Image: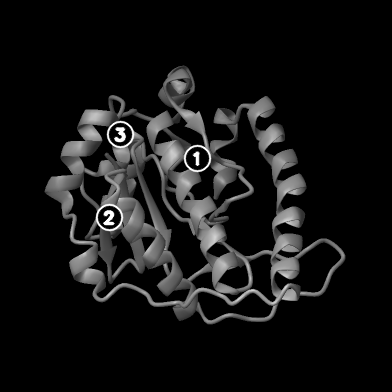
């Protein structure tokens, strides 16, 4: 889980992000209730016409971008500690969640990729709001992997690659079938929303961001995620 990267956490950044989260999420949830109360007509949820065709960016495409925009691969967590000035801590945010079971990567990205992740998370919340869908945050299941992480993954995961884009701090995996519900503190729990509906909204968000030229995206069927590299 994320605890395995505790030695890399920058306390000041983490506390600031957590404070921002506690301040921001109630405001977003409240805004959602106000929008419904005002009787605004929600935007339709459409999804994309084809996941495979809209998100076709294969390894060869993404690895080229990763090598261009990323850092030199990190050997292990000890070396990552020495090089954390090259990376941005992304372990806490009001706009997304880190998977509690993420134990084969560390919550750091290059600044360019950190900005991309922030944009995806915020745009997803904005899109849910205008569509009248109860608010949820995306979950990030994989980020930067050290060479040691990659070696361990290759022992039991046939899809793991020594040339993984995750080695460069430019790449993230976002599951499309798991989300974190946003509920106002002390308020009622949000009504349940199917993961398919949230997946459709997320696919629209990623399509628009990809078409803007910010990233490459691959729809991963076996891994159940969108594999995304900054560009």
Observer-side mark, 1 or 2, equals 2
Q: Residue at x 27, y 53 (%)?
A: 211
Q: Is residue 110 visible?
A: no
Q: Position of residue 230 (x, y in %)?
A: 31, 41
Say what secondary structure mark 1 lies in: loop
Disc tally is 3
Q: Residue at x 53, y 56 (%)?
A: 101
Q: Which residue is mark 2?
A: 217
Quarter of the image for residue 53 reads bottom left
Earlier residue among tags 2 and 3: 3
* Residue 1 as seen in the image, left or right of residue 181: left
Q: Residue at x 71, y 40 (%)?
A: 20
Circle nearer the viewer, 2 or 3:
2
As drawn, 124 above or below 167: below
Of the numbered discs 1 and 2, the one sitting upstream in the chain is 1
N-term-proximal mark, 1 vs 3:
1
Residue 168: assigned label: 3
Q: Which residue is mark 1?
A: 107
Residue at image point 68% right, 26% down: 12
């Amino acid at each position: 889980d994320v605890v395995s990267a505790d030695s890399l956490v920058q306390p000041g950044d983490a506390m600031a992000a957590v404070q921002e989260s506690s301040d921001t999420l109630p405001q977003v949830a409240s805004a959602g209730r106000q929008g419904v109360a005002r009787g605004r007509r929600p935007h339709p949820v459409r999804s994309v016409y084809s996941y495979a065709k809209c998100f076709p960016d294969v390894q060869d495409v993404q690895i080229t971008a990763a090598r261009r925009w990323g850092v030199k691969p990190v050997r292990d967590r000890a070396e990552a500690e020495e090089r954390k000035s090259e990376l941005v801590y992304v372990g806490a945010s009001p706009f997304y969640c880190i998977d509690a079971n993420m134990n084969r990567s560390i919550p750091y990205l290059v600044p360019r990729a950190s900005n991309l992740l922030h944009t995806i998370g915020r745009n997803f919340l904005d899109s849910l709001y205008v569509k009248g869908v109860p608010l949820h945050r995306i979950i990030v299941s994989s980020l930067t992997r050290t060479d040691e992480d990659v070696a361990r993954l290759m022992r039991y995961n046939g899809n793991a690659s020594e040339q993984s884009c995750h080695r460069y701090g430019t790449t993230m995996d976002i599951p499309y079938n798991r989300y974190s519900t946003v509920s106002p503190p002390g308020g009622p729990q949000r009504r349940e929303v199917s993961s398919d509906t949230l997946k459709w909204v997320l696919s629209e968000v990623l399509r628009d961001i990809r078409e803007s030229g910010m990233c490459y995206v691959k729809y991963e069927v076996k891994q159940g995620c969108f594999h995304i590299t900054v560009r």
